[in-house]
Image (cartoon, helix red, strand yellow):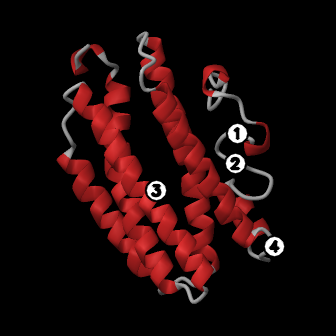
């Protein structure tokens, strides 16, 4: 199958995810550098590394279908990642954790949507890697929420930005997750 046989939405989603993973990694570099707690720094660096791995894995899928890297997304997300990197030193402790968790919450569904697009074309060979990346993003979301779940700012931010203790951008429960073969119900709109 060639890229011409894939949905334009899937191609765009892959290109965007590839570039956005770099932005996330840059943001986490700044986030970790802005923290004092060594355990938090270590965990944020691990999450940064996960983002670099996801970028590599998305590129491998893109290469199978000869999908080019989007120069526009590369520039756009490079600038976004670097801006967030710098802002982590300015906006305090709560907001980097909050917005990282919110971003990861949305990223979960990007990978499950990719899986759904591929499956609609009868392609199942990427199911496991896309499932694993989506679940890893969910783990990141849970970590960030745990760091701020008792912060007095959280109820306000949850009301304004629709993510927090009672709201998520995905329907995955890590304590009761479905195996890859039964995960078609995740992130359906």
Q: Earlier in the sequence, mark 4 or mark 3?
A: 3
Please state the horizontal and vertical placement of residue 182, each as a whole percent of the image: 67, 21
Which of disc 1 and disc 3 is earlier in sequence?
3
Label 2: state its secondary structure.
loop
**Residue 50 tag number:** 3
Which residue is label 1 attached to? 172
Mark 4 or mark 1, whichever is nearer to me: 1
Distance from the alpha carbon under mark 4 to that under mark 1: 22 Å
Q: CA distance from mark 3 to mark 1?
A: 19 Å
Q: Position of residue 34 (x, y in %)?
A: 49, 85
Q: Earlier in the sequence, mark 4 or mark 1?
A: 4
Tell me where residue 173 appears, x and y as whole percent.
75, 41
Q: Give the vertical position of 35 relative to 120 (above or below).
A: below
Residue 114 numbered tag? none
Tag 2 residue: 168
Which sits in the foreground, 178 or 165? 178
Of labels 2 and 3, earlier in sequence is 3
From the image, tell me which residue sits under label 4. 150
């Amino acid at each position: 199958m060639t890229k011409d046989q894939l949905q334009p939405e899937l191609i765009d989603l892959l290109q965007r995810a590839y570039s956005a993973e770099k932005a996330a990694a840059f943001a986490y570099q700044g986030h970790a550098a802005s923290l004092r707690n060594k355990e938090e720094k270590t965990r944020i660096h691990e999450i940064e590394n996960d983002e670099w791995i996801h970028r590599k894995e998305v590129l491998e899928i893109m290469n199978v279908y000869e999908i080019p890297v989007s120069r526009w997304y590369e520039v756009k997300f490079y600038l976004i990642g670097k801006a967030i990197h710098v802002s982590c030193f300015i906006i305090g402790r709560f907001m980097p954790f909050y917005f990282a968790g919110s971003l990861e919450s949305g990223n979960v569904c990007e990978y499950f949507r990719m899986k759904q697009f591929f499956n609609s074309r009868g392609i199942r060979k990427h199911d496991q890697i896309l499932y694993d990346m989506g679940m890893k993003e969910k783990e990141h979301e849970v970590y960030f929420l745990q760091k701020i779940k008792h912060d007095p700012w959280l109820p306000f931010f949850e009301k304004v930005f629709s993510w927090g203790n009672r709201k998520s951008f995905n329907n995955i429960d890590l304590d009761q997750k479905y195996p890859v073969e039964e995960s078609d119900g995740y992130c359906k709109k």
